Image (cartoon, rainbow, N blue to C red):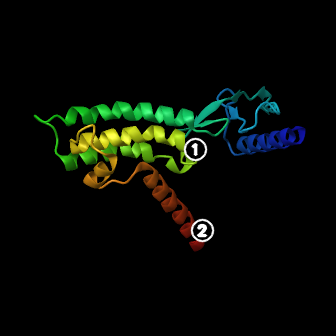
Amino acid sequence: MNCIQRQLQTAINNISQWSDNNGFTISASKTAAVHFCRKRNLHLDPELKLNGVSIPFLKEIGFLGVVFDNKLSFLPHVMQLRKKCEKSLNILKVLSTTAWGADRPSMLRIYKGTILSKLDYGCQIYGSARKSILQKLDPIHHSALRLCSRAFRTCPVQSLYVDCFESAFNYRRQMLSLHYYFGIKYISSIS
């Protein structure tokens, strides 16, 4: 652990020196670290310093809209994402009324713009979580499709997929991850 701590501290010092030379400043008060490790209590967090100030270690941290926890289970991110999507689901509930509600194509567009875009963002990263954690997002997808198609709550999920021309959310995550992978492969092949 001492060797790792020395290497990390050297890297932090090099980054700090580079930023000072190029006119950038790194705020030590806004800096935090996460020790990613799935093992239990085998070693302590390293003691790292930035400009003489100790860097605190957190259990979870948000970076570009994705919450990373120290075990990389992505449970905090999935729960936060579920809360956001449940709030957006209220828009569909209001618009799905039979008296003055929107038609199916409009509802599906609103669903794709407000909820599905949030679920898709970062799915290449959090898609590596356990299946039981990822299944917590499926009820959001299903209830939104039920609202868009005005189906009964007892309607089978597979019928909703066919009726709305949507796939299951785990297949959508895999498809988006493959698109991302092949995009990276293509860019690396032309450069």
Give the x, y percent position of residue 133. 53, 39
Camera-side mark, 1 or 2: 1
Within 10 Å of disc 2 (Cα), the crowding (few <14, some 14-19, many 20+) is: few
Which kind of residue does numbered mark 1 sit on? Answer: Ala
SS under mark 1? loop
Compared across the picture, whether 29 is left or right of 49 comes to left
Q: How many marks?
A: 2
Considering only vertical position in the picture, is 157 above or below 101?
below
Q: CA gap, disc 1 to disc 2? A: 27 Å
Residue topped by disc 1: 129
For residue 106, say whether it is visible.
yes
- Do residues under tags 1 and 2 come within 8 Å of each other at their CB atoms? no
Q: Which quadrant does the C terminus fall into? A: bottom right
Q: Residues within 10 Å of mark 1 (few under 14, many from 20)?
A: some
Q: Residue furthest bottom?
A: 190
Rendered location of residue 49, percent (x, y): 79, 31
Amino acid type at mark 2? Ser
Image: 29 above or below 17: above
In x, y percent, where is residue 83?
43, 30
Q: Which residue is denoted by mark 2 in the rendering?
A: 188
Measuring from the top left, give residue 81's x and y in whole percent: 46, 36
Using the rendered image of the protein, determine whether residue 191 is visible from the camera's viewpoint: no
**Disc 2, SS:** helix
